[in-house]
Image: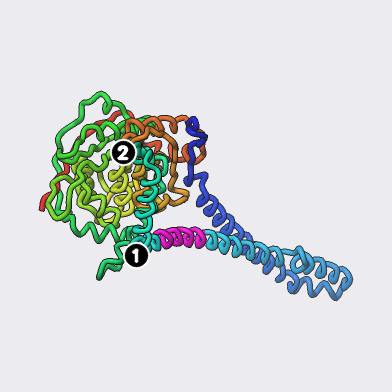
Amino acid sequence: MPPENGTETRIAGGAGGVDADYDDMFTLADSSDDLAFALGRISGECHAVAADPDLLASAALAPVSAARFTGALLAALDGPDGLTAQAAVFGVRALGLRTAVASYEATDRAQAAMIDAVLFTGGLAAPIVLPVAITAAGLFAVTHPEVVMDPPDIQELLTNHPGTVDAVVGAGPGLLSWLPGVGVTDVPGAADLIANLYPDGRHTVTDVGVDANPRTQDPPAGIGDLIDGLDHRNGEVSGGEPDQIDVRVITAADGTRSFVVDIPGTKDWNGPLEHNPELNDLGTNLHVLAGDVSTREHAIAEALRQAGASGTDPVMLIGHSQGGMVAAQAAHDHGSGTFDFNVTHVVTAGSPVGRIDVPGDVQVLSLENRHDIVPHLDAAANPDRANWTTVTFANQHGTIGEDHSTSVSYLPAARDLDASSDPSIVAFRESAEKYLSGDQVENRVYELTRVP
């Protein structure tokens, strides 16, 4: 992908990421332990030779030769470079490697906690700092009337500096803590507090048939095709209409089946304290950010059952914005009574998913436009793990909507990844082969509705 404004695409995590290096260190530690045990066992067996009765009997007949043999044997076993010493060296190496990995991981966790603490403290200081900032802004406006007459484009300002959103969201819990009786200390806690104002209800799922659109007729052959299917479904759903997802049932030449679920983003920005039949609403965002199992997640599970997916069939969940959040949360819950399906892969586009703990048996690919503010709404970076690859690219269009758009921003970036030779992307494509080598596909559409 070509650089924009001097900034190239950045790929973090996955097979070429830091956590993969941690895994390699653990593997080396295990190998060192195995070698230390083997050398120690051989050394013990060889020590037994020195006490062999036949050797002791021969010492009476040839004491000099017996002494030389015993000395050479003990030197090979217990000398500075002997088997016993080497066993100890490899044992110490294994311990050192495990200690180093534990230290690195603890440092990573401490850094993340420190960032949260700094943002929280900013929220605590907001009631004191904001009046000063407002006063300063007013004085600046008086002394610089040209800014008032020609104000900066807020959308362009935000999309050029999306980290501002991290600061505001991260400070939210600290600001809320000023309220009497409110004890939230982090972003999920604040989201949970507000989510209580949005009753999640129960779900109904309606199969509305097979999508005959030409874009849905061919099995996906790459990451670009996966996002193209998501973009198609995203364009079919509008605010005020029933929530829709689709399930692509991919059949291989040998008859085995895989399932790809396309989950669009938020379409309904509703207010609190009212029943809303649309599951793709603001309330679902809050529930998922809080770590709840949302009604939309339950509805997607029901759609998979209706599509014929079993608990062992491989499932890939693909989501834009809120859809990616729900996909990641479902992956967190997969294999349980909550989401009893074999989720092997998750693909997110423009989704704030950094705080969702996706298990290591699920491969995650997250696409994030550097100028899209939505991935910043959880005030957390995606983890650098062997099973989680994050691709950050730069598609600046100057508006929040276009920078977040699947068709304008994310689909072109996904197409570029099909030609990528980055080891993390190559590994993800290879791991997803079952979804990308189908013989035929059927795309079934489901309407999801919330009932009280």
Percent position of residue 392, x then y: 44, 40
Q: Which residue is mark 2?
A: 258
Which residue is painted at 38% across and 61% down in the image? 120
Looking at the rendering, the stretch of residues picked out in magenta corresponds to: 105-119
Q: How many marks?
A: 2
At label 2, which amino acid type do we have? Answer: Ser
Percent position of residue 329, x then y: 31, 51
Q: Is residue 348 visible?
A: no
Q: Badge 1, how many Cα within 10 Å: few under 14, some, many 20+? A: some
Percent position of residue 64, x then y: 89, 71
Q: Is residue 399 visible?
A: yes
- Say which label, 2 or 1, has the lower sequence index: 1
Secondary structure beneath disc 2?
strand
Q: Horizontally, is 80 left or right of 448 in the view?
A: right
Q: Badge 2, how many Cα within 10 Å: few under 14, some, many 20+? A: many
Which residue is painted at 84% across and 73% down in the image? 59
Question: Mark number for residue 185?
Answer: 1
Tell me, yes or no, whether the two marked residues, 2 and 1, touch with CB atoms within 8 Å.
no
Magenta region includes residue 339 = no
Secondary structure beneath disc 1?
loop
